Image (tube, helix red, strand yellow):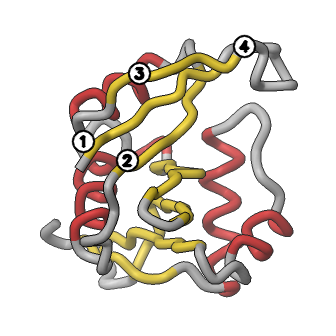
């Protein structure tokens, strides 16, 4: 990931994360949700920074997941809209799942909106498979969620 750097999410990065969140989701998490997530022992939260031409770091993506025994549950993944369609989400997720002491993980799970074809395609590319459907999961639209799982 040349020119990109993964860092742990901190309270100082939440405003930038919320900006990406608000641009990415119709029912975004609040600042309090992200701050709460930082307090859980089983929660792992990362940001991806891009060094720009002015040699300043720009937060362009984030990832939140929890580890529960031997399963990893992806809660949030988003890339800034101006940085999408460049393989960043795929590289970022792969890096985080392979480089943060997760050797004991047997499966990764996530929920995705049934109509989010871009995200479904990304996860399928990374060997996630649809293993279930949650009817009317998203209260803002009543849309179903697809449960996807990757076995390690």
Asked which quadrant contains residue 135, the reply is top right
Relative to residue 34, is residue 140 depicted above or below? Answer: above
Secondary structure at numbered mark 4: loop
* Mark 2 and mark 3 residues within 8 Å of each other at the beta carbon: no
Q: Earlier in the sequence, mark 2 or mark 3?
A: 2
* Mark 1 and mark 2 residues within 8 Å of each other at the beta carbon: yes
Q: Nearer the viewer, residue 145 or 16?
A: 145
Task: Estimate the x, y position of residue 8 in percent, counting from the top left.
Answer: 48, 82
Q: Earlier in the sequence, mark 1 or mark 3?
A: 1
> How many C-alpha atoms fall within 10 Å of the one at disc 4: few (<14), some, or many (≥20)?
few
Mark identifier at residue 83: 2
| Mark 3 vs mark 4, CA separation in Å | 14 Å
Relative to residue 97, is residue 125 depicted above or below? Answer: above
Q: Earlier in the sequence, mark 3 or mark 4?
A: 3
| Mark 4 vs mark 2, CA separation in Å | 31 Å
Q: Nearer the viewer, residue 5 or 141?
A: 141
* Mark 4 and mark 1 residues within 8 Å of each other at the beta carbon: no
Q: Which residue is mark 1?
A: 86
Q: Which residue is mark 4?
A: 135
Mark identifier at residue 130: 3
């Amino acid at each position: 990931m040349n020119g990109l750097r993964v860092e742990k999410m901190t309270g100082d990065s939440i405003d930038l994360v919320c900006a990406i969140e608000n641009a990415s989701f119709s029912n975004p998490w609040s600042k309090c949700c992200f701050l709460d997530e930082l307090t859980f022992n089983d929660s792992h939260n990362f940001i991806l920074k891009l060094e720009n031409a002015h040699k300043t770091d720009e937060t362009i993506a984030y990832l939140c997941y929890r580890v529960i025994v031997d399963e990893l549950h992806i809660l949030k993944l988003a890339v800034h809209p101006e940085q999408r369609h460049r393989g960043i989400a795929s590289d970022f997720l792969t890096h985080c799942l392979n480089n943060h002491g997760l050797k004991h993980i047997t499966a990764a799970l996530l929920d995705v909106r049934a109509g989010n074809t871009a995200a479904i395609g990304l996860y399928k590319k990374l060997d996630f498979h649809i293993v279930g459907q949650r009817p009317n999961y998203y209260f803002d639209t009543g849309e179903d969620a697809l449960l996807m799982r990757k076995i390690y």
